[in-house]
Amino acid sequence: MRRVWLKYLEVSRTTVRSRWAYLWDQVLGGLFLVIIMFVYVQLWRTTYASGSGGDFAGYTLPEIIWYLVFAEAIILSLPRIDAVLDQEVKDGDLALRLNKPYNYLLFHYFSFMGDCLLRVVTWLVIGGVTVYLLVGGFPFRWEGLPAMFSVFLITQTLNFCYGASIGMASFWVEDVSGLYLLLDKVKWVLGGFMIPIELYPATIRRIAEALPFRHMVGGPARLFVKFSWAGAGELLLLQGLWLLAFVGVCLAIFRLGVRKVDVNGG
Amino acid sequence: MAPILTMGATSLCKVGTSSATLASVRTIFRMPRKAKEGMTSTMAVIEVRGLKKVFALQRKPEGGWARFKAAFKPEVIRMEAVKGIDLDVDKGQALAFIGPNGAGKSTTIKMLTGILHPTEGSATVLGYTPWKQRQQLAFRIGSVFGQKSQLWLHLPPVDTFNLLARIYELDWLAYLQRRGELVELFELEEIIHTPARKLSLGQRMRCEIAASLLHRPEIIFLDEPTIGLDPVAKASIRDLIRRANKEEGVTVFLTSHDAGDIEQLCKRVVIINHGEVILDDTVNSLRRDFMKTREIDLKLDSPFDGALIMPGVTVVKSKGYGVKLAVDIAVAPIDAVVGEILRTYHVQDITIQSQPMEEIIAAIYRGRKESAS
Amino acid sequence: MAKFLQLFGAYFKANMAIALEYRASFISQVFGMFINDMIWVAFWVLYFTRFPVLKGWTLDDVIVLWASLAFSFGLVSGILGNARRIPQMVVTGQLDYYLALPKNVLWHLLIAQIRPIALGDAIFGPVLLVVMVELTWAKVAVFLATALVASCVWLGIMLIGGSLAFYMGNAEVVNNQIFNGVIHFSSYPITIFDGSVKVLLYTLLPAGFITGLPVELMRQWSWLRFGQQALAGAFFLGLGILLFNGGLRRYESGNLMMMRS
C-alpha cells in the first residue's frame, strides 16, 4: 500500500522537477502579475479615497488587495487539466494509459497538485512582495496556517474535479475549449475572483452563495485574509460536502467515458 | 534475354550466357564519348565571381553565469559559410548543386535569390544583382524548397495559384490559360481542387513545381525537390522538371542529396564542400572519371578454383558456387574480363554493377579522387 | 494601387475560405472571445453598481474605453493578422518566403493573413457601444476617428516589438509581456493612475493614446488633443516601420543570433 502512494508522490516530484527548468520563464511571466496587482491597487486606492458612498463590507484597503493576491494565486496556479485531458482523449493517449499500473485520475491529480504547489509559491511570492511594497501587510494569523493549508488543498482538489470533468467532456464533445472558457469564466464571476462576493449587488450575491464556486476561489481567499477558527471550520465543512459531490461526478464521467472508449475502440 | 542496364544509383544487369548478349554488353560498356562542353547558345544567366559569406555568430554558453556575462560581451565566432565561389550558368542548363550538409549550398542559393547579402564578391542573375534588385528579380525566377511549402495547407492548390497570379501581377486571362497548360502537363486535374493537406507528398510537390512555373520564370531554384518521396513520385517529379527544362527552356538550378536526381535531370554538376567548389563538370565526365570499378557477381557450375588471374581484377569474396569480383576498368576493359570469365567457366548467372553514384560523391566529399572499391 | 487592392482581396478571400472550412472551430473561438469580453463588462457593471463614479468616470465612459480597445486592437490583429506573428516568422525563417516574392516584404506579410476571430473583437466593441451608450452621429465620428488612430498606435507597437526579434532571441516572450502590459493598462480608466505612471502611459506603454484620449475626446472634443493623439499614432507607426526595415537589413545580412535553417 505504501508503494502505491510512493508511486503517486513520485509523479508529483517529477512534475515539479520538470517545471523547475522553466522557472525563469515563469518568473518572467510573473511580471504580468506585478502589473495586474499594481493596477488593482491603483483602482481600489482611488475607490477608497474617493469615498464614493459605498461601504466595503468590512474590507480595509490592504485587506481587499490581499484578498485579490490570494484569489489570483489560487486561479493562476491551476494547471490546465481540462486541456490535458481533452488532448489525451482526442489523441487516444488515454486508452494507452489505462493499461498502466496506476489509476488514471489519481495520476493526473498528483501531477496537477505538484504543479499547482510549485506555481502557487511563485505567485504568492511575486504578488505578495509587490502588494506589500504598495499597501503594506495585514494581520496574518500564522497559527491558522495548517488549517489554511488544508483549505488550500481541498480548494484545488475541487478545481481539479471541475477542470477534469470539463476536459473529459471531450469524450462526447468536439470542441471543449469553448465549453471551458464559458464554465471557467462563470466560476470567476460567481466565485468572486475579481471582486469579493460580499460587494456584489444583492440578487447576484444570493445566487453566488448557493453555488459551489465561491468555495473554489473567493471563500478561501477571504479566509486567508480574515482568518477565524469558526470561519475555517465552516468553510472546510462546506467544501467537504461539495467535494463529495464533485468527486462523485468526476468519477462518473470518467467511467462513462471509458466505457464509451471500450465500446468504440477509441 | 535482352540486357537491362541503367547507369543509375544501383544499376544491375542480368545477362544471359549467349554470345549475342555478350556483344550487347560490349557495346553498352564502351563508354560514350564525352559530351561536348559549352553548348552552342551560350548566354550566361547566372554569373558568380568570388562570392563569399561570413557569418558572425554569437556563441550561447551553458550555465547561468556565463550566459549573463555573454549578454554584455558576446563571444563572436566568424563562420565562413561560403569561401569564394565562381560559377557560370548558361540559359537552359540543368545544373545540380550538391554537397554534404553544411557545405554552403543553402547559403549560396539564398544569395542568388536575394534573400541574403554576401560579405564579398559579386553575382548577376538575369542581369540583376540579387540582393540589390530583389523584387525585380523575383518576378523572373521561381523557387521550390522541398521542406517548405508555398501552398496554403488548408486550401486547394488552385487557390494558391490564384493568389500567386495576383502576387506576380499576371494578366488574369493569360494566367488562366497558363494554369490550364500546367494542369494538363502535370496531370493535376484531379488534385487541384482538394485541400493541400489531404494530398500526398508527391502530389503536393507536383503542385508546388507547377506553382513555381505559373509566372513563366526563366530560372527555377529547386532545393531538395524529391526529398521524402517514394520512387514512383520521384520519377514523376523528375520527369516534370525535365520537361520544364526541355520544353520551356527554363534554367534549372537544383540542389539535392539524391544521386538519382542528379543523374536523371542534370547535365552538369557542381560539388561544393566547406564553402568551396570542389568539382564543376558534366555528369558524363563524372561518370567516366570516377566510375572506374565494376563489380561482377557470378554463380558458377562448380566451386570457384581461384584460377582467374587478370590484372585489374580482384576477388572480393568467394563462397562455394558464388564469386564476387572487382574490376578496375581503367586497367582491364570489361568486355575482356567478361569474355575471359565466360571462356574459363561455366557461368550460371552473372550480374554486373557499377559503383553507385552515392559512393562516388561521398568519396569526392572526402576529397579522394580515386574511386573506392 | 489597383494591384494592391487586388492582392489584398485575394488574400482576404483565401483567409475567409480557410475560416469557413473550419467553421465549428471558428464559431467556438468567436464564442470564447465573446465570453472573455463579457467578463470584463461584467466586472465593471458589478463595480459601478457598487461605486457609481470613479474619479469622474462612469459606466458609460468605461464602455467607451472597452469599445475603443476592442475595436482598435481587433482591427489591427484581424486585418493585419501577421502583425503579431513577426517574431515567429523571423525565427522560423518564414520571412524568406516573403523575401523571395516580388513585393515589399512588410506590407506583403501584413496583408497575407486575416484573422476572422480578431475581427470578432473589432465588431464586439462597436456593438457594445451601440447597445449600452446613447450615441449621436458626432460621437460616432469621434469614436471612429480616435479608434483609427489607436489602431495606428497598436500597429506601431506590434512592429516595434516584432522588430526586436531581429536583435534578440526571446523576442516572443518579451512581446507577450509588452502586449499584456499595454492591454492591461488600457483596460482601466486612466484617471486612477497618478503622476509618474501617467507619464509612462503616454510614452512607453501608450495606453493613454489607445483608450485614455479616446474617452476624454468622447466626453469633450478638443482638436488640440486629437492632434496630439494623431501625432502619437504617426510616431509609433513610423518608428515601427523604421525599426522593421532596419531589422530586415540585418536579417538579410544573415547576422542573427538565432540559428536560421
Image (cartoon, rainbow, N blue to C red):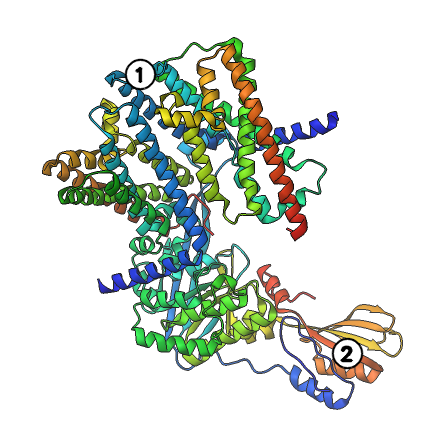
Apparent side of residue C152 relative to residue B196 in the rendered image (left or right): left
Return the x and y of residue C165 as percentages of the image width and height: 38, 43
Residue at 40% x, 12% y: name it.
Answer: A137
Corner quadrant of residue B347: bottom right
Q: On what subunit does the disc labeled 1 rest?
A: A
Instruction: Identify the amino acid type marked 2.
Output: Ile
Question: Do we see residue B253 in this rendering?
Answer: no
Apparent side of residue B231 relative to residue C70 in the rendered image (left or right): right
Q: Secondary structure at mark 2?
A: strand
Asked if residue B61 is positioned above or below residue B186 in the image, the reply reads above
Asked if residue A128 is positioned above or below residue B369 in the image, the reply reads above
Q: Tell me the number on the disc at residue A55.
A: 1
Report the quarter where the N terminus of chain B lies.
bottom right
Task: Please tell me which residue lies in front, C236 or A195.
Answer: A195
Return the x and y of residue B136 as percentages of the image width and height: 30, 65
Q: Secondary structure at mark 1?
A: loop
Question: Gap in Å between the C-alphas at discs 2 and 1?
Answer: 102 Å
**Label 2 crowding class (10 Å Cα cut-off): few <14, some 14-19, many 20+?**
many
Seen from this angle, which residue lies furthest bottom? B20
Task: Please tell me which residue lies in front, A14 or B247.
Answer: A14
Instruction: Identify the amino acid type marked 1.
Output: Asp
Residue at 42% x, 22% y: name it.
Answer: A69
Q: On what subunit does the disc labeled 2 rest?
A: B
**Label 1 crowding class (10 Å Cα cut-off): few <14, some 14-19, many 20+?**
few
Asked if residue C142 is positioned above or below residue C26 in the image, the reply reads above
Looking at the rendered image, the disc whose residue lies closer to the viewer, 2 or 1, is: 1
Asked if residue B10 is positioned above or below residue A162 in the image, the reply reads below
Corner quadrant of residue A30: top left
Return the x and y of residue B132 as percentages of the image width and height: 30, 59
Return the x and y of residue A21 as percentages of the image width and height: 54, 32
Q: Tell me the number on the disc at residue B350.
A: 2
Residue at 37% x, 27% y: name it.
Answer: A203
